[in-house]
Image (cartoon, rainbow, N blue to C red):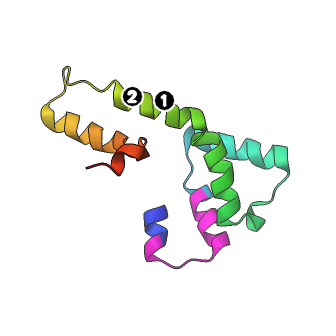
Amino acid sequence: MKKYFQIYNYFSKLKSRMAIYNLTGKADIWWKDVKRITNIKEKYVTWTIFKNFFKRKYLSEQYFEEKEKEFYELRLGLMSMKELCSKFLSLLRYVPYLVDEK
């Protein structure tokens, strides 16, 4: 969604409503629980508010630690070299102090 919003200059509330509309499965159930527990109305939810709720649920510190661990434990194993390179690059963002090194 973030990439999509870089192209289109939507208002903050429209961004959040579009993101909420696109939630499926467990994420949709999670959002319904958030609304019920916090008594928040979707029409008043800004993009910043939604991102904060989402980050707390799905991008916790533990999540980043698990991804960092996955990066350090990455081995070729049964993957092809192409798959390994792809996985390496996707996990590299979770180890920011290595990104700066050449």
Question: Mark 1 and mark 2 in contact (Cβ < 8 Å)?
Answer: yes
User: Which amino acid, mark 2?
Assistant: Glu
Question: Is 76 on the left-hand or right-hand side of 98?
Answer: left
User: Which amino acid, mark 1?
Assistant: Glu
Q: Taking 81 as reference, is 36 above or below it?
A: below
| Residue 66's disc number | 1
Instruction: Write the residue at 19% across / 27% down.
Output: 79
Q: Quadrant of residue 68?
A: top left
Horizontal and vertical percent position of residue 12:
64, 72
User: 12 or 84: nearer the eye?
Assistant: 84
Question: Is 8 on the left-hand or right-hand side of 44?
Answer: left
Query: How far, Cα to Cα, is label 2 from label 1?
Result: 6 Å
Instruction: Write the residue at 18% across / 21% down.
Output: 78
Q: Is residue 9 magenta?
A: yes
Question: Is 65 on the left-hand or right-hand side of 78?
Answer: right
**Secondary structure at numbered mark 1:** helix
Residue denoted by label 2: 70
Chain part drawn in magenta: 6-19
